[in-house]
Amino acid sequence: MSVWIAVIATGLGCYALKLGGLVTPRRMLDDPRVRRFTDLVPVALLTALIAVQALSDGRTLEFDAARLSGLGAAVAALLLRAPFLVVLVVAAGVAAGLRLLGL
Amino acid sequence: MSAAGSARAAGEDVPDEEAPDGIARQESAEDEAARAAAVRDGLGVGVAVGVSGLAFGAAAVTAGLTVAQACALSLLAFTGASQFALAGVVGGGGGLVAGTLGAVLLGGRNALYGMRLAATLGVRGRRRLATAHVVIDETAAVATAQRGRAAARAGFYTTAITLYLAWNLTTLLGAVGAARLGDPDAVGLDVLGPAAFLALLWPRLTSGRTAVRVAVAAAVIAVAATPVLPPGVPVMLAAVAALPALLGRRAAP
């Protein structure tokens, strides 16, 4: 499967989900268990992505000190309630700085 | 910001704004003020979050997408987490089928926003088809933060239009800019994806212990599965961390 097909399929799939929400009968949301599950799925997926992107390169687990420090800096920025873009700049800046120093 | 704040604002602790229609009929100065405030919110969120399309454009090209592919993804998918996810899989040389499924699955929360906003927006037919494309974190956050349906709609569409224009323009700029960079890792671009996810997720992680438990379990599952499963699959597999919510009794979240 080429990257183009993946791009278009992702676009179509994401659109289908958005539309599905708008046309879904409201009573389906009434089951609190369904609601809790669908509410928590993004938490699981996003955390998994963070962990995999932070700790692996392809199928190899690796500990890149600069990258992990950048993410640590992002956590610090979030604790200080920094805006989204500041968090990104701080994270990238710390990683870049450490690599410049030869880490 | 707003992408982070948005997840919470659109979450379940926000009271429903579906006011009865009678209220909307009083065209008072108060309604006008509420609508103006909603438009200001929409513009602020749209511009502030829109700028971070630079990060996506740069991350996508760094991961190996072409500039055209990065732009197409922003135009067609228009939901940050899924876009970063697909770029991440491409960058990691992962299976594109699993990567695509994972990216689409990540867009699942937009379906929830849609369920939440359907009555507020009250759109039908072709307008519903167009509106669906912009049901995302930020638009849902701004819409649910307003008082009354008129203000909610004004906030929703202001955010939608501003953010769509900004996000796609900055995606192009970020993608073209990244193409000129030497070694993207040297300027820390590999950290942008995970840092963006972290920021998006932060309000959830700091507001509930259930979310933290699910997050930890998901991270452990994904990392443990990474050496033994094709790239993209471990992240999908991590969705099972949310299953106890479906099986449990009605414990408070």
Image (tube, rainbow, N blue to C red):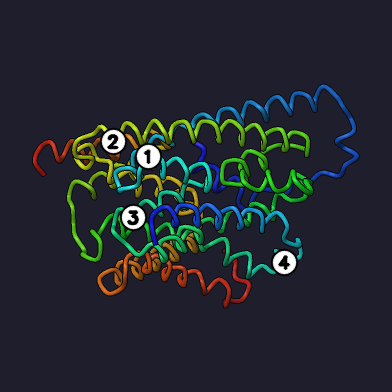
Label 3 crowd (10 A; few <14 / some 14-19 / many >=20): many
Q: Say which of marks 3 and 4 sits in front.
A: 3
Q: Of the residues under marks 2 and 1, which one precedes in the sequence?
A: 1
Q: Hey, what amino acid is under mark 2?
A: Ala
Q: Chain of mark 2?
A: B
Q: CA distance from mark 1 to mark 4?
A: 40 Å
Mark in the foreground, 4 or 2 = 2
Image vertical order of residue B74 relative to residue B206, above or below:
above
Q: Crowding near pointer 4: few (<14 within 10 Å), some, many (20+)?
A: few
Q: Position of residue A103 (x, y in %)?
A: 11, 44
Is residue A19 toward the left or the right of residue B228 in the image? right
Q: Amino acid at mark 4?
A: Met
Circle nearer the N terminus (1, 3) = 1
Q: Chain of mark 4?
A: A
Q: Are marks 4 and 2 on the same chain?
A: no
Task: Report the amino acid beneath label 3.
Answer: Val
Identify residue for label 4. A28
Q: In this figure, which residue is indicated by the disc labeled 3? A: B90
Whether marks 2 and 3 lie on the same chain: yes
Rendering quarter of residue A14: bottom right
Q: Secondary structure at mark 4?
A: helix
Determine the residue positioned at 42% across, 52% down. Answer: A4
Q: CA distance from mark 3 to mark 4?
A: 35 Å
Q: Earlier in the sequence, mark 2 or mark 3?
A: 3
User: Residue B150's x, y, as percent?
Assistant: 78, 35
Instruction: Name the image quarter holding the C terminus of chain B.
Output: bottom right
Q: Which chain is indicated by disc 1? A: B
Identity of the residue drawn at 28% across and 38% down: A92
Q: CA distance from mark 4 to mark 2?
A: 46 Å
Q: Residues within 10 Å of mark 2 (few under 14, many from 20)?
A: some
Q: Which residue lies at the image location 69% right of the left edge and 69% below the top edge? A: A31
**Do the residues at discs 3 and 4 belong to one chain?**
no
